[in-house]
Amino acid sequence: MPADSLPSVPAEPLPDAGYTVSVKTLCAFAARAGDLDLRFAPAPSAQEGVAGHRLVQGRRGAGYESEIALSARFGCLLVRGRADGFDPQRGRLEEIKTFRGELEAVRANHRALHWAQARCYAWMLCEARGLDGVEVALVYLELGSDEESVLTEHWRRDDLRAHFEALCGRFLGWAEREAVHCAARNAALPALAFPHADFRRGQRDLAEAVYRVAAAGRCLLAQAPTGIGKTLATLFPLFKAWDRQRVDKLFFLTAKTSGRAIALDGLRRLAGEGTPLRVLELTAREKACEHPDKSCHGESCPLAKGFYDRLPAARAEAAQAAWLDRAALRRIALAHEVCPYFLAQEMARWSDAIVGDYNYYFDGSAFLWALAREEGWRAAVLVDEAHNLLERARSMYSARLEETAIGAVRRKAPAPIRKALTRLRREWRRAQQTQTEDYRAHDTLPAALVRALQDTLAAMGDHFAAHPLEAQGPLQQCFFDLAHFARLADSFGTHSVFESLLAEDALAIRNLVPAPFLEPRFADSLSTTCFSGTLAPFGFYRDTLGLPDDTATLDVGSPFRGEQLTVRIATDVSTRFRDRARSLDRVIRIIAAQYAAQPGNYLAFFSSFEYLRSAFEAFALQQPEVPSWAQSRGMRESERESFIARFAPGGRGIGFAVLGGPFGEGIDLPGDRLVGAFVASLGLPQHDAGNECMRERMQALFGEGYAYTYVYPGLQKVVQAAGRVIRSEQDAGVLYLLDDRFARREIRALLPAWWQVQAMRGALPPIPCPSSA
């Protein structure tokens, strides 16, 4: 079978020809003008907005209609959306908006956008029901008081139609070009050629699995070793399936900047110059900002001034350019004097393949997920190095409050806020009044503390609404921190614990199982493939991440041969905390003996900075002639690059690093840039009160508390670190596992099957590096 062929699946019927757009997108495209203005306003959360809509709808009388699905055509353009409500007795269509503070604080350009949306829904309703006209109402609900402010207009059918068609006319030229682009893309992608003559060993298996789950609308957990070309193997089948499965977007999500670079390289190799495919790289706001010393509004930042007036030309050039990595997007944005970050946000609507960090889809306020839901996209999602998603997701859905920071704000805060923060502090102290130990975990949140937190947020919101210029600096950051804590308090459950840390004077909501938060993200995708070199056991990741029960799994066999990597377990070494000092000399002697027998570049991994420092100092004292260098805490990017640069081709020396840190995964040192590694730890998390709390919860939820808390996370780090040695079928090297526990049957079962592991004890001769193939 040639490399560019994949299994066939039945084609689904294609939608009617034309272009479909939501009311919100149409109005955002055609009705916006003026400045970009992101000055802080105490905006309601999504849950508050939904609750506010329901409150207003519930107040209306019998016969009131809510959430009315509407659509209308203009030429080849299909516009669709949901109107908030319609009162047939009064002939009034309502668009409901929630806010905090004074109605006058709702900015004019926002209100103009609200009117545009309401009028579109009004025309669509008239068209659907044959009405001669309606009353159009903007209903603004102030959440602090639950009071409504209603603004009304009376519109005749013909005037509403003219308004709707004027907006569509502005959009239609763009929509027609988009339809041409989509048709060309859909025709080109099935004919896309694989960029190599054939698949590598294991690469076809992964590609076929991705293709099949996309066809079936399922998710996939795929463990595939380094060296088979996972990026191309996951991208290529989705492009081949694009037209048949009516894929709208492809999201390639990564944990690190290096992952984005690899994804972009794969996309460039697949799409080439002639393929009509728009590729967008999303970059963090702090990295994309051209004026970090200015605020995001027209009175401060020149790139926000008149942003929406200059956006159409910038958008048109970006669409024409098609390849929109960070550098290309910046060049276009600055040529048109618009903000690069917000141009990227706009181009997410019009790009085909989007590369960005996990948080764009999985975070609580995830931009891509919200946009996909809003637009009804059929999005195929690829999650690179997915073993990182668990800890990243836990951090997304955790929050911490520190009395030191809040106290500093309280002392300088305006009186109403200071009073509320004082009440919050009182409830904080009450929650800790019986605590004597440094750490205590709770299964519930104190109700009085939550009420005080909500009251504080309301007081701060009211103050910011009345004094918007004071919404900045530490006071604003305090509001954000409290709001994040409050949102997690609202969704608190068995997936999290409430922690009181007495010595640190802090309170925290710590997420242990992000599954309930991630489940909707997987459900809303057409298909999600999570892939990594270390995703075993699959059940652990399926349980903790919340993947569907019917998630497919694939363990791709390694392309490497057992004789490429000589693996030995030092069964006479214990790196348990109580034994480290006693075994350190043995560890150093093993490292030194291997280096003496086969000089070259090695990495030595340790479980903590303290352990690393002890080993590094002991080695330097015993082997001063051997070049050695060590990872330090908080290394800057330039320092990390210098550490890696020491591993030069033909070089010699030993780099000491922390297991699970930046040098344990995501770095590529092929050939003799790295000939061996020493792992002096199982990587088990520290046995402390916090992790013991997690073990108990994991036991209660999944029946495997110790394995889910300690063993699986630890061995994942070990296998990732060991994977630095063999990067291709031509590499060869050695690996020492320096702890007797690696010889246990249950631990050996979690190591890669292709490793040929041998036990060593006592003064055995060092291992000569295998010859490269």
Image: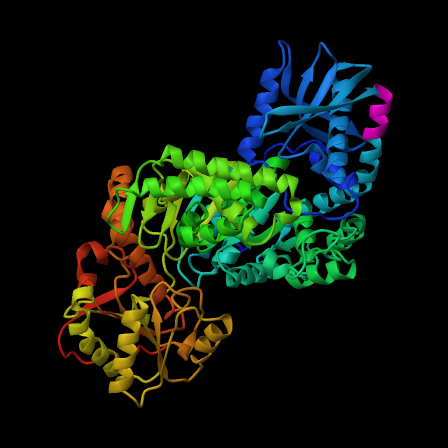
Exactly how many numbered labels are in the figure?
A: 0
Q: Quadrant of the C terminus?
A: bottom left
Residue 318: percent from the left, percent from the top? 73, 54
Q: Is residue 609 left or right of residue 18?
A: left
Q: Residue at x 51, y 48 (%)?
A: 478
Q: Which portion, as a residue range, is magenta? A: 157-164
Front one among 574 and 244 = 574
Q: Residue at x 58, y 56 (%)?
A: 284
**Can residue 291 be seen at all in this image of the molecule?**
yes
Q: Is residue 433 above or below residue 306?
A: above
Q: What secondary structure characterizes most of the magenta part? A: helix
Residue 244: percent from the left, percent from the top? 60, 39
Q: Is residue 767 left or right of residue 226?
A: left
Q: Residue at x 73, y 31 (%)?
A: 117
Q: Is residue 445 left or right of residue 736?
A: right
Residue 608: percent from the left, percent from the top? 30, 66
Residue 730: percent from the left, percent from the top? 41, 73
Front one among 299 and 71 = 299
The residue lying furthest to the front in this view is: 415
Q: Is residue 167 above or below residue 184?
A: above
**Can residue 218 be seen at all in this image of the molecule?**
no
Q: Is residue 121 left or right of residue 656?
A: right
Q: Is residue 158 magenta?
A: yes
Colour setting: rainbow
The residue lying furthest to the bottom in this view is: 625
Front one among 291 and 22 = 291
Q: Is residue 327 magenta?
A: no
Q: Residue 99 occupies which quadrant of the picture?
A: top right
